[in-house]
Image: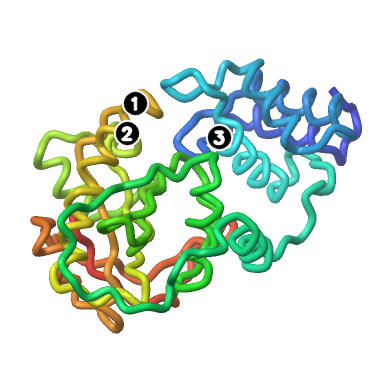
Amino acid sequence: MNRNTNGPAHRVAQLYTRGKLPLVIRGREFGLRDLRVILSCAAQHRLRGRTFISQEICRQLDWRQPNGWLKERACRDVLRVLHRKRLVRLPRSLVGNRRPRQRYALLYHQRIPNLDLKTPVRAQPKAIRLEFAKGNVAESLWNYLVDKYHYLAYRASVGRSLKYLVWADERLVAAISFCSPVWRLKPRDAVLEKLGVSVGELHERVINNNRFLILPNVHVTHLASRVLAQATEAAFKDWSWYYGIAPLVAETFVAPSRFDGTCYLAANWLRVGATRGFTKQGPTHRNGQERKHLCL
């Protein structure tokens, strides 16, 4: 370890001697040994970039998902926290700035040129089909559609996620996704504890419906609730298959200034509370967002 009295190794040693270890980040404890592994990997593989560093750290700490995959994205989030705390020095990101909308638009026009997103869809479909959109061309289209038409646009999820394109009688009508849940939320946690789900289980047993888009040319009564019910059921099964974890509850947040959340209630979700309007920005929380309805 570096003996520089102003360096990360010295700061880690100070935390240890003052009894301030382990650190808890993203629900995982990092003690002195863990931080030494992180410092060593960051220094040894500095020229190979943050992704390789995170993968090597996961291998050495045996930090894996239940299905055996390395938790490298979570690890990179931890590395960014440690970097802000000046407990590790990270190399400059090799990815650089990206412009997702232009990238997804290019993929969309090149690969699926005949998709009709303008002709109105009004008839009740006989069948609704979900297309798994993960690590394939369908995911590129999903990213493009959500980035272009959803009011929150597309943002890469940190943690687990599943995406689906939704087809109604072979017409593309919607896109929906589920991801890891909000880490801590008092009204949700209180409800789930009453149902026997402990705080320690929450992050493994809850999934978050973070995006739900009905395409703007689709005008079909009750379609949203049908899609939501079918997609939620599929997500529970696919989450168990893909990640090796069986979720028990799904959550979502409804912005009352934009939506009533009627499709969720029609799909047998329950409104159980509201958020306080806080959003996480780096290491801090800011109370500047609209308070949203919480549904489970």
- Tell which circle, 3 or 1, labels the residue nearer the N-terminal end: 3
Rate crowding at label 1 as few (under 14), some (14 to 19) or many (20 or more) other CA atoms within 10 Å.
few
Q: Which residue is mark 1?
A: 241
- Tell which circle, 3 or 2, labels the residue nearer the N-terminal end: 3
Numbered label attached to residue 238: 2
Mark 2 secondary-structure assignment: helix
Q: Quadrant of residue 206?
A: top left
Q: Kindly report the distance in space between the C-alpha atoms of the residues bearing marks 3 and 1.
A: 32 Å
Q: Kindly report the distance in space between the C-alpha atoms of the residues bearing marks 2 and 1.
A: 5 Å
- Amino acid, disc 1: Trp
Residue 145 image point, x, y percent? 48, 65
Q: Residue at x 27, y 48 (%)?
A: 129
Residue 189 image point, x, y percent? 23, 47
Mark 1 secondary-structure assignment: helix
Mark 3 secondary-structure assignment: strand
CB contact under 8 Å: marks 3 and 1: no
Q: Which residue is mark 3?
A: 23
Q: Residue at x 30, y 54 (%)?
A: 185
Q: Nearer the viewer, mark 3 or mark 2?
A: 2
